Image (spheres, rainbow, N blue to C red):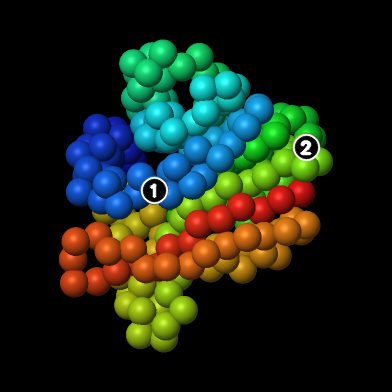
Amino acid sequence: MSISKWLFAVWYDLLNAGVEGRVIPYRKETAGRTWGDVLEIGGGTGANIPYFPADTSLTFIEPDKYMVKKLMRTASKLARDVTIVQETGETLPFPNESFDCVITTLVLCMVSDHDSVIREARRVLRPGGALFFYEHVVSPRRAGHWWQNKLNPTWKFLTTGCNLNRDLTASIRNAGFKEVELRSFDLSVGLPVTIPNIVGVARV
């Protein structure tokens, strides 16, 4: 598994290059709207760093040691002072009400227990804080859902953990936030198929 994770980290930016241009608007819609003390769960290679406002204080949770190295290089290249904690999102090592904003982008598909991660995000938010999210989700259409279920085992293996068929919309709506603003759409990745996505904000 460590070899596959190393390969995934090495090739992640290259693999993502084909769709990154389509994703940038949603990075701006999430990372670009944060303020104050910000926690990103699943910092990856640091793709969101260019879009965080300059006056935000950035903390990243990233359990993958190979991704941590790339995240550190990105932060250094962009001259951002960041804190990186090598832990998981299911058990955040922070007290209640530690952050003004939490952000997840294309990471809830990868975690072991996405419901726990969402609950933890809510726990560490201060009153008036917000969880910003951009994720791909299970298809609302029967045929799409069927194909996602069929493809998921192979897709999960090839991507070292990404799941195609998670109902993250329901998980976020049922997590106890005061208000959830959410937009659903299909993202084209340059293939004959599109991927169901959501983007939005959940407030405490």
Q: Which badge, 1 or 2, is on the more N-terminal residue?
A: 1
How far across and how far down the image is residue 81, in percent? 50, 14
> Vertically, is 13 above or below 65?
below
Q: Please give the name of the residue rendered at 24% of the width and 60% of the height, measured from the top-left corner.
A: 189
Q: Is residue 7 visible?
A: no
Identify which amino acid the numbered label 2 is placed on. Answer: Arg
> Vertically, is 107 above or below 55?
below
Q: Which residue is mark 1?
A: 25
Q: Please give the name of the residue rendered at 71% of the width and 50% of the height, measured from the top-left corner.
A: 203
Q: Which residue is mark 2?
A: 126
Locate the N terminus and report the quarter of the image it occupies.
Answer: top left
Q: Which is closer to the viewer, label 1 or label 2?
A: 1
> Vertically, is 55 above or below 101?
above
Q: Measure the C-alpha gap from mark 1 to mark 2.
A: 26 Å
SS of the residue under disc 2: strand
SS of the residue under disc 1: helix
How far across and how far down the image is residue 103, in percent? 56, 42
How far across and how far down the image is residue 107, in percent? 46, 47
Q: Are marks 1 and 2 in contact (CB under 8 Å)?
A: no
Q: Quadrant of residue 15?
A: top left
